[in-house]
Amino acid sequence: MAQKSFRCKLVTPTAGLIDDKCVYASVPMFDGLLGVMPGRAPMLMKLGMGELRLDFADDAKMQGTGSKGGSRSFLIDGGFIKMANEELTILAEKAWATETLTKADAEAEARALQGAKPKDNTPAATEDLMHARALAAKKLEMTGKGGGI
């Protein structure tokens, strides 16, 4: 029996990171996690910050060639997703492959932000600092996970 899949593209303003067949995606939305499987109804939604997990189709089972299946994780920070015609497009403002995150870098970033003060006394500056701290904490959390293929 053929494994059902959908095309998944992950792009940022500076790079195309993924363009492959997936069987499942766990997507961090602005209001929680969203699971995406083949046959999903069309949608356009806002991304949040968190772990994007992509489970790839095993094309070897479907066609005798292609990707070998497995999973991959990314840290996503903002953007939008669109699902239409069995294609999930993830337009992320920022994305880091989990395997590129190091514990030492994440700890250094968290330490640097721990005592930091907002640039000025505006609510926007305070919110920016809180967001940077949350992102550093998420990077540190994700360095303890596997996440490679």
Image: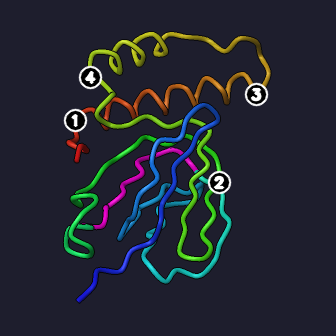
User: The residue tagged with tag 2: helix, strand or loop?
Assistant: strand
Q: Position of residue 4 (x, y in %)?
A: 35, 80
**Nearest to viewer (mark 3 / mark 2):** 2
Segment colored magenta: 48-58
Give amino acid for label 1.
Answer: Gly
Q: Position of residue 138 (x, y in %)?
A: 40, 36
Which one is earlier in the sequence, the residue at label 1 or at label 4? 4
Instruction: Say which residue appears at 22% left-offset and 47% top-offset.
Output: 149
Element under label 4?
Answer: helix
Alpha carbon separation for disc pair 3 and 1: 31 Å
Q: Earlier in the sequence, mark 1 or mark 2?
A: 2
Identity of the amino acid at label 4?
A: Lys
Q: Which residue is mark 4?
A: 103
- Give the residue at x 49% y 15%: 113
Mark 4 → mark 2, Cα distance in angstroms: 28 Å
The residue at which mark 2 appears reads as 80
Percent from the top left, x then y, of residue 7?
47, 65
Q: How many angstroms separate mark 3 from mark 4 (CA)?
A: 29 Å
